[in-house]
Image (spheres, helix red, strand yellow):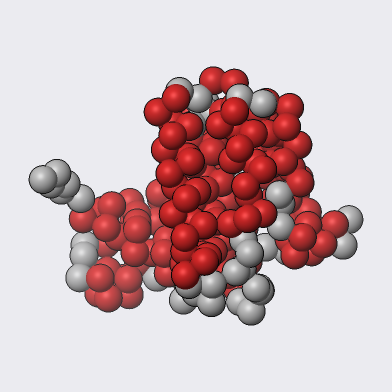
Amino acid sequence: MKITKESVESQAIRYLRSHILEGHIKLGAKLVESALAKELELSRSTVRMALNSLVNDGLVIQKPYSGWQVVEINEQDLWELYHMRLALEGEAAAMAAKWASSDDKRRLADFFQEYQLLCLQHGDDTRRISEMDWQLHLLIVEICGSARMLNQYKQILYPLQAYIALTHQDYDLSDSASSHQALVQAICSGNAVMAAEQARDNITPMFRSAAVQTN
C-alpha cells in the first residue's frame, strides 16, 4: 500500500484552490489571512505560503496595502485567456502525439475510458464531469514533455475553470467525453497534425462564443 504524507501547506492550497474553482469563494473576493488561519486552524504563515502558491496558479493576486484577493476576470482577460489556451493546447497536443511515451499514452487512454464511463453512467453529474474534462486537458499538457508549458498552462487553466464554474453552471456536459475522442485517438496514434487541430477545435463552444464576443 502506498502511503503519502501531504504537508499542511499542501492541504491548505488544495482546500483554497478547490473552493475557488468550485465557486464557493467568488471571483474578486477579498481573502483575509487572519480569518483563513482561524477557519483552517493554521498559522498565518502557512496560510500566506498557500496564498502565494495560488498567486502562481493565477487564482489569487496580492494588492499592495490591501491584502489578498481572488482574481477577477473581465472581457479582455477572457479574450486573452481563450487565445492563450488555444495556442498552448494545440502545441501541447502535437508535442504529446510526437513525444509522449507509450506509458503516458496508455495513461491518457485509460483516463479517457474512465471519463467516458462517467458520462455514460452519471451524465447529470456536471461537477464531476467538468472536473474530469479539465483533468484530461491538463494531462495532455503534462505528457507533452515541457515543464515550462505546463506551468504556463496552469495559469490559464485555473482562472478559466473558476470563471466557467460561476457562469456556466447549467451547461449540459453529458456528451462531454465523446467530443474528446478524436483528440485522444490522434495523440495515442502519434498524429501530431490531427492532434493539434482537434485540440484547437475542442475548445468548448460555450467558452469560444463567450470569448470571441469580447473581441
Name the image quarter holding residue 167. bottom right
Query: In the picture provided, is 148 more to the left or to the right than 73?
Result: left
Query: In the picture provided, is 9 more to the left or to the right than 193?
Result: left
The image shows residue 155, relative to residue 28, as above or below, that is: above
The percent coordinates of residue 112 (x first, y second) are 50, 48
Q: Residue at x 41, y 64 (%)?
A: 18
The percent coordinates of residue 96 (x first, y second) are 56, 28
Name the image quarter holding residue 140. top right
Q: Quadrant of the C terminus?
A: bottom right
Q: Quadrant of the N terminus?
A: top left
Q: Nearer the viewer, residue 17 or 104?
A: 104
Residue 52 seen by the camera: yes
Q: Residue at x 47, y 70 (%)?
A: 121
Q: Nearer the viewer, residue 104 or 38?
A: 104
The percent coordinates of residue 196 (x first, y second) are 71, 33
Residue 61 seen by the camera: no
The image shows residue 109, relative to residue 192, as above or below, that is: below
Q: Nearer the viewer, residue 206 or 178?
A: 178
The percent coordinates of residue 5 (x first, y second) are 15, 48
